[in-house]
Amino acid sequence: MNLTLKIWRQPSVDKKGKFETYQINDISADCSFLEMLDQLNEKLINDSNGPVDFTKCPVSFDHDCREGICGMCGLYINGRPHGPDSGITTCQLHMRKFKDGDTIVVEPWRSKAFPIIRDLVVDRGALDKIIQAGGYVSVNTGGIPDANSIPISKRNSDLAMDAASCIGCGACVASCANASAMLFVSAKVSQLALLPQGKIEAKERVQSMVKEMDSLGFGNCSNTYGCEAECPKEISKSNIARLNREFIGAKVCYENEVTRAAGGA
């Protein structure tokens, strides 16, 4: 396959970026998208001869496991997070999804909360801060022998496991017109809100995580469900409804407690 690549190049967070065009030939349809970028970088290195400008240096992009587990490899490819396929991360995208002679546009995630570090690499530390704001679970969940000592219905355990499969790649943010992190936050809230072990800190958890999400610059849910469509782990939008219920319920309980305290003073 012979391809034209239009790739976003940006030296650093405080400098302007722009698209650069590269030609790459003899790409196997069976290689992954990241392997194709590896071959491009090898070509750029081999073609260099002494000092070169930034656009002829290897392209920086994030990756780690290359098994669809870590979510590091988030790229915006031809207008879609993780590229033209469903239920996969970028490292699981294969070049057979493209045609010989295609032009492929590659960008980083676009969000105020995800500043670009260099080229296609963004700082997604905002998602880690939301997790940290959620705090901890004080209930001893037990070891392997007694892990099922607290009865949990199969429906709730299945829903909790589905929510827990979120890998925090940020595709939901990249796909949303408002750069909302609601699907990510709702998955992290749901995986504990559905289980009895997560009930003790539930009210504080949801309020803290939503507050942190808002403070980091993420937008409100756009209600287009693009997040669900582009999520590599196919997290359900129903978790967003659960997040809203948990948040409103926590706010009502807090206001009732304030009212009772004021009346008893």
Image (cartoon, rainbow, N blue to C red):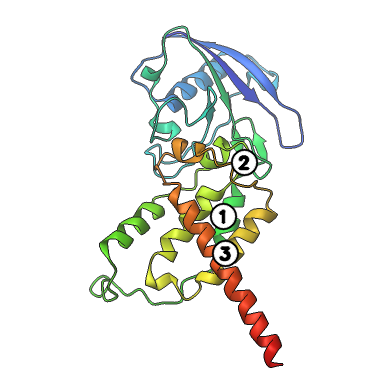
Q: Evaluate if marks 3 and 1 touch, with contact meaning CB atoms under 8 Å apart.
A: no
| Sequence order check, earlier mark of 1 and 2 | 1
Q: What element carries label 3?
A: helix
Location of mark 3 (residue) = 248
Residue drawn at x 41%, y 13% as measured from the top left: 27
Residue type, numbered disc 2:
Ala
Tell me if residue 166 comes above or below residue 147 in the rendering. above
Residue drawn at x 51%, y 48% as measured from the top left: 183
Q: Quadrant of residue 119?
A: top right
Whether residue 243 sits left or right of residue 165 in the image: it is: right
C-alpha distance separating marks 2 and 3: 22 Å
Whether residue 196 sits left or right of residue 153 in the image: it is: right
Instruction: Confirm whether residue 134 shows in the render.
Output: no
Q: Evaluate if marks 1 and 2 touch, with contact meaning CB atoms under 8 Å apart.
A: no
Query: In x, y percent, where is residue 247?
Result: 56, 63
Q: Residues within 10 Å of mark 2 (few under 14, many from 20)?
A: many
Instruction: Confirm whether residue 254 shows in the render.
Output: yes
Count of marks overlaid on the render: 3
Query: In x, y percent, where is residue 167?
Result: 44, 48
Tell me if residue 23 comes above or below residue 97 in the rendering. above
Residue type, numbered disc 3:
Ile
Q: Which residue lies furthest to the left in this view?
A: 145
Residue type, numbered disc 1:
Asp
Residue 128's disc number: 1
Of marks 1 and 2, the one in the foreground: 2
Tell me if residue 27 comes above or below residue 234 in the rendering. above
| Sequence order check, earlier mark of 2 and 3 | 2
Of marks 3 and 1, the one in the foreground: 3
Residue 179's disc number: 2
C-alpha distance separating marks 3 and 1: 24 Å
Residue 10's disc number: none
